Image (cartoon, rainbow, N blue to C red):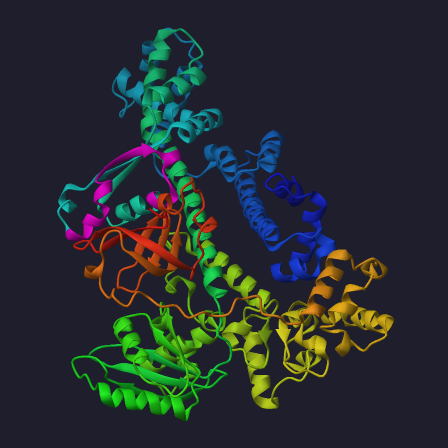
Amino acid sequence: MNIVSFIAKQVSISEKQIAKTIALLDDGATIPFISRYRKEMTGNLDEVAIGEIVKYKAGYEVLQKRKESVLASIKEQEALTPELQKRIELAQLLSEVEDLYLPYKKKRKTKASVAREQGLEPLAKIIIKQREEEILFVASQYFTADIINEESALQGARDIVAEWISEDEKVRNRIRRLYQRKATISATVIKSKKADETAQKYQQYFEWEEPLQKCPSHRLLAILRAENEKIVRVKITVPENDALDIIDNIMITSSIEACTDHMFLAIADAYKRLIAPAIATEILNQAKEKADDDAIKVFAQNLKQLLLGSPLGQKRILALDPGFKSGCKVVCLAAQGDLLHNENIYPHPPQRETTNAIKKIRSLVNAYKIEAIAIGNGTAARETETFIKKIPFDNQIQVFMVNESGASVYSASKIARAEFPNYDVTVRGAVSIGRRLADPLAELVKIDPKAIGVGQYQHDVDQTKLKNELDTVVMSCVNSVGINVNTASAPLLSYVSGIGEKLAENIVKYRSDNGALQSREELKKVPRLGGKAYEQAAAFLRIRDPKNPLDNSAVHPERYGLVSKIAKNVGIPVHELIGNKDVIAKIELQNYISEDVGLPTLTDIVKELEKPGVDPRKKARVFEFDPNVKTINDLITGMKLPGIVNNITNFGCFVDIGIKESGLIHISKLANQYISDVNAVVQLNQHLMVTVISVDVPRKRVQLSLIDG
């Protein structure tokens, strides 16, 4: 089976579309580039569909590599038959390949290998054929110095038979299906850990059992984390009688009790010692893989929403990283995000230099013509917000609370040290808070997504798969917004289609040596930025105030000639066509369809001409918490509060209500009807009005509801 047919069986996409997409991918094209600028080739596939092709393409390549390895190993043993080779080549699952390979796999020393060394394999073959009525007499022919009686000979032979049974493809497939249908997961607390304080968060899993199929991903990951922390023991089981009946029906082919009695013993041994542990591990790994996929999907959705959060735009910002004893770090940023000034103020206990702090803030706001104030939402955030809002500024200043998750990770990072080599981590952290308000995407790409705090069990899932998915999300977000090539940082540029880390550094260095780029064409002068990289990247990079107005749009340079032709046909220059909705509305797109440009691309071009380079993100809005609620002790059941969604999981969402602890809206409390997808109701950073339904002060847990009444 070729790669196109393999992928077509997994997804609802035609083989023609898959083949074209694979050709583009193999030619070095990225998902954002293909989905935006090669619509005619792929049949207008979007990023999600192309991402699925990428995923199954990688799976096919892993499968083929394993097949090659297995075939080579069996061939080396001179055991590869044409029939076996064909079965391996046609296998569509790794488990199929491994089952076919199992009898030929090099094994460590086993009970069966010891029995073979003792010469008992012929006796095992007699037992498995189930035709010998005088099996005890036959067994007596195998006495040696190690085999002193009939039972020891038969036991050794049964060990070999048990291994054969465990390697039987039909047996493994039937038992595998049984586990897929009836497997139960159970967790039991390790007695010595039951009283440990750290174990109490897993208390509900101290004695837990449920069908594995019904165990949701977040619960499975929680149970496995408890097992990894050696708090519980986890087992995957099925009804043993069901399993033994399945194997009996396959392996028992005779009614001669002399042999079948030994077969029943070998079957029980094979199941308990060899088959059950292997299949249970395999099924648990599959469930874990699915749970990982679910958790990664949730993380990816959250990350996308966070990265595409509302930017305030290029404003002069004063940012504060609040604190009590150490004071509040204050920085003033230029509209482009450059650091202009930094110092500390102490408006809170124990110093409480309030008057002096007010004077300093007023002075800085006036001196640097500050347009907005950003306050990190960590320790002392609400107190700092109250302090700032009491200051009588000469002009109205908007005050924003900014999620500072991951700011400390950024401030100690290599990127931060390179940006601010002469400043300590506190200054860098405050700068990050201010820049996040101006442009969340540009700042958050500098931080490992796992440190941003919007995931679920992100440290427990497959780390390679997580990184690949999150990198894809970041690239998608960066390219959907478009990047100012003359102001973007190297980390931001590195996510542009076709660029990567090295070329990003080269672009920044080129800017430093030669000044701002004047056109997209000038990108070709950047060292090592060749034709392929230019093709992939150019349309996602913007030039502000360019000579060619299309350089500040999402129109690809390869279509500039087409736009010029359209402008000529309507009788006005390109710069007058851009934004001229009346003229654009009259363009007959059908007249411009060609072999490589279809209606999807023409429609995109016209939309871009109407609003070139428009930022798809919403603008930032000021949000205010309830001023009467500062700590969990201020909460009362039934109270209605404003809040901001700060994390989304499969079982609900967490809401910042202005206290240290985020409240949970369980999925059952999101709407009056059944909800299967939390994202269908709420989005990250969404402003909500919630109702407090329970407060557990000792455990610091707050339950909220979105259902009125």
Q: How many marks?
A: 0
Q: Which residues are magenta?
A: 197-219
Secondary structure, magenta segment, majority class: helix
Residue 262: quadrant of the picture: top left
Q: Position of residue 512 (x, y in %)?
A: 56, 88
Q: Residue at x 56, y 76 (%)?
A: 504
- In terms of depth relative to the viewer, which is nearer, 101 or 226? 226
Residue 529: quadrant of the picture: bottom right
Q: In this view of the protein, can residue 682 be seen by the observer?
A: yes
Q: Is residue 514 on the magenta stretch?
A: no
- In terms of depth relative to the viewer, which is nearer, 52 or 257? 52
Q: Position of residue 37 (x, y in %)?
A: 69, 62
Residue 648: quadrant of the picture: bottom left
Q: Residue at x 59, y 78 (%)?
A: 485
- In terms of depth relative to the viewer, which is nearer, 323 or 277? 323
Q: Residue at x 45, y 50 (%)?
A: 681
- In terms of depth relative to the viewer, which is nearer, 287 or 565? 565
Asked whether, in this view, residue 46 is left or right of residue 340, the answer is right
In this view, 372 is above or below 309: below
Asked whether, in this view, residue 48 is left or right of residue 707, the answer is right
Q: Position of residue 612 (x, y in %)?
A: 67, 71
In this view, 394 is above or below 706: below
Q: Is residue 211 on the magenta stretch?
A: yes
Q: Position of residue 308 (x, y in %)?
A: 50, 65
Asked whether, in this view, residue 77 is left or right of residue 522, the answer is left
In this view, 26 is above or below 608: above
